Image: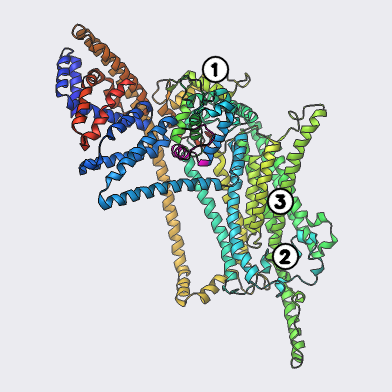
Amino acid sequence: MEEEEEERNTKKKKKHGSAKREREEREEDGGKRTVKEKAREGRRRKHKRVETSSEPETSEEDELKEETEESDVRPESLTPEELEMLKEAVEEKKKLVQGLRGKPWPMKKKLVTLRESQEFVEKYEGALGKGKGRKLYAYKVMMSKKWMKFQRDFENFKTACIPWEMKIKEIESHFGSSVASYFIFLRWMYGINMILFCLTFGLVMVPEALMGRPYGTIPRKTVPRAEAPSAMDFAVLWDFGGYAQYSVLFYGYYNNQRAIGWLKFRMPLSYFLVGVGTVAYSYMVVIRTMARNANESGVGDDNSFNFSWKIFTSWDYLIGNPETADNKFASITTSFKEAILEEQESRKDDNIHLTRFLRVLANFLVLCCLAGSGYLIYFVVRRSQKFALEGLETHTWWERNEVNMVMSLLGMFCPMLFDVISALENYHPRVALQWQLGRIFALFLGNLYTFIIALMDEINLKREEEKIIKFNITTWEASLYNATGSENSTAPPVTFHPADVPRGPCWETMVGQEFVRLIISDTMTTYITLLIGDFLRAVLVRFLNYCWCWDLEAGFPSYSEFDVSGNVLGLIFNQGMIWMGAFYAPCLPALNVLRLHVSMYLQCWAVMCCNVPQERVFKASGSNNFYMAMLLVILFLSTLPAIYTIVTIPPSFDCGPFSGKKRMFDVIQETLESDFPAWFSKVFSYASNPGLVLPFILLMVLAIYYLQSTSKSYKEANVDLKKKLQTQNEENKRKNKLAALKAQTDLEEARAATQTAERPKNNNASPQRQHAEEEEDLGSSQRKNGRPPPSVRHQDGRPPATRAPVPRTLHPETHRSLGYLPGGGFPQQREPRMHRVPSLQRH
Amino acid sequence: MGTTASQLGKDLLSEYQELTFLTKQEILLAHKRFTELLTKDEKELQNTRVPTERILTLPELKSNPFRKRICHVFSTSEQKDGSLTFEDFLDLLSAFSDSATLEIKSHYAFRIFDFDDDGTLDRGDLEKLVNCLTGETDETRLTRDEMRQLIDNILEESDIDKDGTVNLSEFQHVISRSPDFVSSFKIVL
């Protein structure tokens, strides 16, 4: 209301310049009310300022003043109403303190504000409660303070606990965020493997080792007589044969005893659940991380700010190495030029047929490579089976390790070949990188699956073998029984040493061994290529450079770059193998933890000492979910064969925790029947009835469909709203600008009019006022940063003419009013703020 | 306030933690690095200003094309010479830290890019910005036409009220949608 009145007054004044003086008088008469109104306006304005933080100076000083004024008041003489106000003020201060770190003020100001506010809070917080409540309040305050401190300390502790943080930061500041992203990924992987390791180690390996039957008591836990002489040889152990094969590291060692030790630990059940839990946990973590990444990037891929992003966000502030910086300059320049070029001529391909032909040719070549490598692996695996049947001893080292070596070598050289081929295609570097990654992915996947298929063949062979052996054993036992049975009255039953008992081939252990060998050889090749390809090369380039005919450092061999995408892919595939093999070789996560740990140090060292920054510096965040998606695909594809074998192939009859059962998952059934009360298994059998399961699955599918369609519609609505917002924004701004322009011309007219009318009457006021007006303009233009609604700006343009002289005349009165009302809660809240009027104008 | 004395006070340390996005270790590290920049007799004094040249010897800032602007923006010096006190230095690290909010990062980014300190990014500012990003050498520099085209495009996209300049709110609007900004606007010691 008052505002409106004032507005009307202003208008009136503008129309009739002569009426102005009259109005001023009236204002001076009615004094206080207008001042209050002004104070409120000032406060409102101040709030805005604090929010937008475009003008910290004044608000800070106001804060100070308010402080001194308010501390004069004694808390004892407060009415409930005032108390309420005080409480509010205290809350406000607290909020201010909390938000202080998010304010772009210089530290000194923040410090002063913090101290003042804390003093204020401390002083009045105690006064706020009464009697018992007061003590409780004080206690609560103290506890909250302690809690805050604890939280902060805990935060500090947490950041101190993150491993390799300093190492990664060093790399980050040297090579930029993309190389560092690989190491962060590596660390993340390490964390996951650590948990998997804890699961398998704590729930499977340690219980079996401690509480299970010791080594040598039963056949499956003993090295067979034939292998015993060579069981301790290093070559055999390195191949994970001999004693390593008959240990907790592999599936075959575990006994099918239902409960072991004094804890009655359900070993087979635990083994099965850990296997399932490993997979489930991995899925959960990967999907959760993906969702979080997707959330963070959010509306990432709308292309409306292509250029602005390029210019405002392309510099990576972490780069602290001149060489990287130079590369970054070059890449930014090319990206600018490309963007400009693309803008200028959107798609003008002159020789499209040639490009197409070349691309088709390139893809054909890549397919040939993939097929060739697949066939090679299949061939090698089959050959190795032949060798294995003939007995390993007759063959050379190469023939024994052929499979792993061939796989590692293929993984090493095929990507290089792809790189050469992709030069034919002439893609944009980013697209080329994705093609390259896709192809390597396909290669690795193809190799892995050929390997698995070959392994499946071997499993089938072993199972054939097993049948024969099983038959032999029964006859052997029967003969034994007959032999002992005939003379059982006299001689004690003949006991065989467990090493002499014939046994089946145990295909599960074989699978586990294959995977462990694969991992080991993969790790070895990685480290050796690192040492030769990076370190040796760097040493040669550095020292041969003194006596060579061309500049080695700048010229051909040069130093190697750190290949982020290749390394990430390697890591992902390695993890895939872990997931695949972990069920049959519980030691795999442990091995992987070891490998990642060494990798971390080795690669950190190699990067810092012998790699040069990439020529094309990509930023990390863009491809984050791309890698995660790959990891998810690999996870799915690697659990598929593992689950297939678990579900369809019956376990070996004489080794492993599930021996004697038809299928591995029968453990669950068994546990339900014997360990849980009868009603539970009944309920479970009802629940697993197809009549219930099928509708449930149907319901889930429906729910997924529903959620998906709603999310789609939300997305559409989002896009629509965005469009609407954009057009609205533009329209608003245009209108706003017009209005502002109009207001300005109006103001100028009015000013001219008043000046001509007033000059003879009032000499003093007008220069002062003009000055004030200028300041107001300045203020409003600064506030423009905070995007004021049009009406505010409109108002701001006008009132200064009327407001300017007021504070000077009324200033003493505000002081007096304070003196009269020492403890008045409401006025007390307000009156200190009056000072903002002068301070606002002083700046 | 014995800020640049050899040891930070406990109260002060906790206050700094309250006021910045830094952890205790980071503040202590910052303090160590900062005192390394001081000469011997400066260490005795309190609240010493370290001149820009010496700040720029820090490897974290050395190859940053905006290093002078960064010092300038964070300096509270009266002479506008870009010299930093320890508290200014903490402000700088806080704004560039991992956990700083998008709002504060974009605020400071805007001030860094605003080469003439007039509160908006006009064509001159943008040109200087592009030149900073493309490096000093002639071969990487854009031609006049390219520059004009580029700046036209930028203004086309981000100048929402079409007044020929980019102001803070427009800048923040653009930045807040960028996927890369928060991850790359970082400096760690």
Q: Which residue is mark 1?
A: B145
Residue plotted at (62% across, 74% down)? A257
Q: Position of residue A524 (x, y in %)?
A: 73, 50
The quarter of the picture where residue A692 lies is bottom left
Q: Which residue is mark 3?
A: A522
Inspect the image, locate mark 1, and give the three-letter code of the amino acid beneath it.
Asp
The magenta stretch is B1-24
The quarter of the picture where residue A333 lies is top right
Between marks 3 and 2 in the image, the one whose residue lies nearer the viewer? 2
Give A603 or A473, whichever is nearer the viewer: A603
Q: Is residue A590 left or right of residue A56?
A: right
Helix, strand or loop status at disc 1: helix
In the image, residue A568 sits, relative to residue A448, either above or below, namely above
Does residue A802 appear in the picture of this structure?
yes
Q: Is residue A681 left or right of residue A737?
A: right
Between marks 1 and 3 in the image, the one whose residue lies nearer the viewer? 3
Helix, strand or loop status at disc 3: helix
